[in-house]
Image (tube, rainbow, N blue to C red):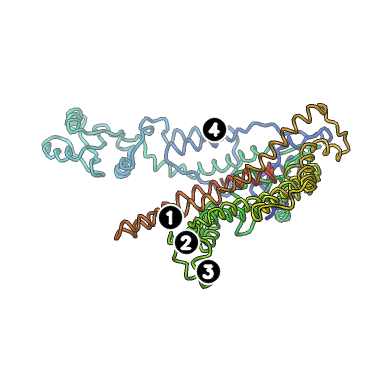
Amino acid sequence: MAIVKMKFVSACTDQEHLNQMLLTGLHSGMLHAVPATNLITEENGGQVISIDNPYQGYVDALKTMARAVGAKLSVLEHPSRTYTASEIEEILKKLNEVLGLDSDAQAQTLSPDDEKALDELSVCGFEKMNACQYLNFGFGRMPKEGFKKLSMYREERFVHHRLNENAQYVWLVYVTSDTYAAKTERIFQSLFFEPIPIPKIDLRARLAQSQAEMDDLYTYCLQQAEIYSLYPYVIVLDSKQVLAGYVREEDVDAYEAAFKGQPVDFRLKDPSQVPQCKCPTLLKNGWFARPFELFVSMYSLPAYDDFDPTMFLAITYCLMFGIMFGDMGQGLVLLIIGLVFEKKGKLFGVIGRCGITSTIFGFLFGSLFGYEDALNPIHQKLFHVREKLFDVLANSNTMTLLLGAVAIGALLILSSMALNIWNRGRHKQWGEMLFSQNGIAGVIFYGFVIAAASGFILKGSSPLLKPVFIILFAGVPLVCFIMKGAFSRRLEGKPMKPDEGWGGYFTENIFEALEILLSFVTNSMSYLRVGGFVLSHAGMMLVVMTLVEMTGKGGIPVLIFGNLFVMVLEGLIVGIQTLRLEYYEMFSRYYTGGGIAYKAFAAAEAE
């Protein structure tokens, strides 16, 4: 588990080479740029380039034009030349005229069948058809029943040609003279003919002639718009143009190499040397933990100088999910689904890892697709037991299961506290490390309570419940909870006396200490759900197996459907409940988050 190391890189050039530097930085795919306003201070006297971006309007106009005529714009590697603003506007005006975007015929929305028929008709040439002085053309669709009746009008002075058809309609074109146009139109109306205007121009031919010019202009405008969009990230220092941001430490050499041949100077700094900027976070984990970055990101990424909790979350999540969803057969199904579809998303990766622990605990519980006795021979041979290692449904094991769940919860709570102590120590937050409910005082208090309760449950009494131990391991930590603020100020070299006075301080903190004591109880009891869902899962499978026995020959479909139903329903519930325990019972003790995601410019454009 790790956070990728970053470097703060400043690229500097003159005004003449600014655009070239910005394009290189944009397309390098390595720079997480920092807005210039974050870098300006009274000492450096930097300025921001404040210029409107006129090219974005041209890009939008070309996109609108392409959508209107059904064209697809392509981005070329390089535009063939540069364009002035007046040239761009003139070309856009010409393209509007050439493509006939002011024509009503082009504004009509056509179905795929309409388009197919129009393609067939285009062979005749739309412009030639519209230019005819004595012939009248009609194009549209007609119900098939009406088309059959056209044979009744063989003597009339018109001809028609079928262009396309589907189950309900026939698309056709008819031709008649101007003299008989009105009568022919009435005949077709009586047969429920639905006319479609014939385009005034051959759009496809004209588009083919204009496509190259549109692509070249689009490439140039898009490139210029990208450059203008980067100006807010440029700080001007003593007539020098500076593009600054964060690059992964391993990519620094490659980033500098991308500017080869350009008059660009570089300055490298450690992120800690730029306190006014927030360094982005990029997580880096191994195969097992990587999918669980999804859950960390959902909560909040860690700050760059913090630690990555992904591995701890992955282990504890899989552990709790596996216990609550303990079925060897269903676990194997989850594992296979996760491995097969892992490339589709991190959630499938989570499912696959949880399938591993579900398989393990399913084996230990002796459950295979709801068959509770199927693994008994293996258990008897491996573990030398009478039936199986642990029978979830046995009444004698219910209390053991619930107490075991609380014990697991206590262990996870203490582990979370230990992580918090370590992390607070790293950041020299001594007050939180020593005196908080999640610090050393909290570990002593909670550990004492758990140890005393365990002895009482196991032996009926506990030697720890003596006044001297209670004072040392419960009373002293309780005083630390109450006096945390005052003791922390003392460690910082400040007076212990709070600004609001001792009266208000004690009133507020005594109630907070009572809340802490209550939270220890409720947090521990929250883990009862781990044992509860073990029983719930076993109970649901018992219902499925009962239905299988009742249905006789139809037992196999019931078994398959029942297992699928339990996997989906129980898997969803267990997954949510486990995530709740991670966020509310563990993350709240040791993790603060607050980081921002590393996002290079090229990655943003690709999305």
- The local crowd at label 4, few if under 14, some if 14 to 19, many if 20 or more residues have their Cα within 10 Å, is few
- Tell me: 203 left or right of 464: left
Q: Residue 89 carries which label?
A: 4
Instruction: Where is residue 83? Give x, y as percent.
Output: 59, 38
Image-based side of 495 in relation to 335, left or right: right
x, y percent for residue 554: 30, 58
Crowding at mark 1 (Cα within 10 Å: few <14, some 14-19, many 20+): many
Which one is closest to the eye, mark 2 or mark 4? 2
User: Which numbered tag is attached to residue 367?
Assistant: 2
Give the amino acid type for the residue marked by disc 1 in the picture. Met
Amino acid, disc 4 = Glu
Q: How far apart are marks 4 and 3 (CA)?
A: 87 Å
Between residue 19 and residue 552, name the one nearer to us. 552
Label 3: which residue?
385
Residue 307: % across, % down: 71, 50
User: Does label 4 or label 3 sit earlier along the sequence?
Assistant: 4
The amino acid pointed to by label 3 is Val
Q: Earlier in the sequence, mark 3 or mark 2?
A: 2
Disc number lying in front (4 or 3): 3
Q: Residue furthest bottom?
A: 381
Choose between 513 and 288: the one closer to the eye: 513
Give the amino acid type for the residue marked by disc 2 in the picture: Ser
Give the mark nearest the N terminus, 2 or 1: 2
Cα–Cα gap, marks 1 and 3? 24 Å
Q: In which quarter of the image is residue 51?
A: top right
Please name the residue that numbered disc 1 is placed on.
541
Residue 163, picture quadrant: top left
Q: How busy is the neighbourhood of tag 3: few (under 14 within 10 Å), some, or many (20 plus)?
A: some
- Mark 3 → mark 2, Cα distance in angstroms: 16 Å
Mark pair 2, 1: CA separation: 10 Å
